[in-house]
Amino acid sequence: MLELITEFLKSEEFKKQMKFMVETLVTKVVDKVIEEKKRKKVIKKAGDLPDGSASTPDFEDVSEYFLDAGCENRLASRFMNYYDGTGWMTKTGKPITNWKAFADMWIDRDQEKQQYSEPEFNRL
């Protein structure tokens, strides 16, 4: 059995199969890299608003916005991490051009969650 395997590994058929598999894998990797570069170009172009300001904010801006709304810095950090991870794209794949609108949704949801999770105590 070992001889058969060794013989097959030395055969031209095995070499052809391996070459095909490697070429296929390399092609897929190259396609993914090209796709990612195109996606980043779209994000970069979408990030430039008509007035010249960038749509992707700095953490300091996000943190200040959340703190002004009465939220903890932890929520601002979660917001930044989430949208950095998506490349500042919506769930439908469109670039985010107004991050404050999305931040407002996070803030509203957090405040609603706090409102319903806080126990109410009767004051005497």
Image (spheres, grey):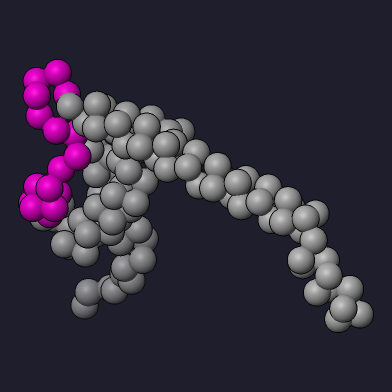
Q: Nearer the viewer, residue 3 or 40?
A: 3
Which residue is painted at 21% across and 64% down in the image?
Answer: 74
Which residue is painted at 14% across and 33% down in the image?
Answer: 54
Does residue 104 appear in this view?
no
Image quarter where the N terminus lies is: bottom right
Q: Nearer the viewer, residue 39 or 97?
A: 39
**Residue 50 lies in what quarter of the image?**
top left
Residue 52 among those drawn in magenta: yes
In this view, the residue farthest toward the right is 1
Relative side of 89 to 24, left or right: left
Which residue is painted at 89% across and 73% down in the image?
Answer: 4
Relative side of 8 to 25, left or right: right
Q: Nearer the viewer, residue 62 or 6?
A: 6
Q: Position of residue 101 (x, y in %)?
A: 25, 35
**Residue 87 lies in what quarter of the image?**
top left
The magenta span reads 49-65
Residue 85 among those drawn in magenta: no
Looking at the rendered structure, the number of numbered marks drawn on it comes to: 0
In this view, the residue farthest toward the bottom is 2
Does residue 35 appear in this view?
yes
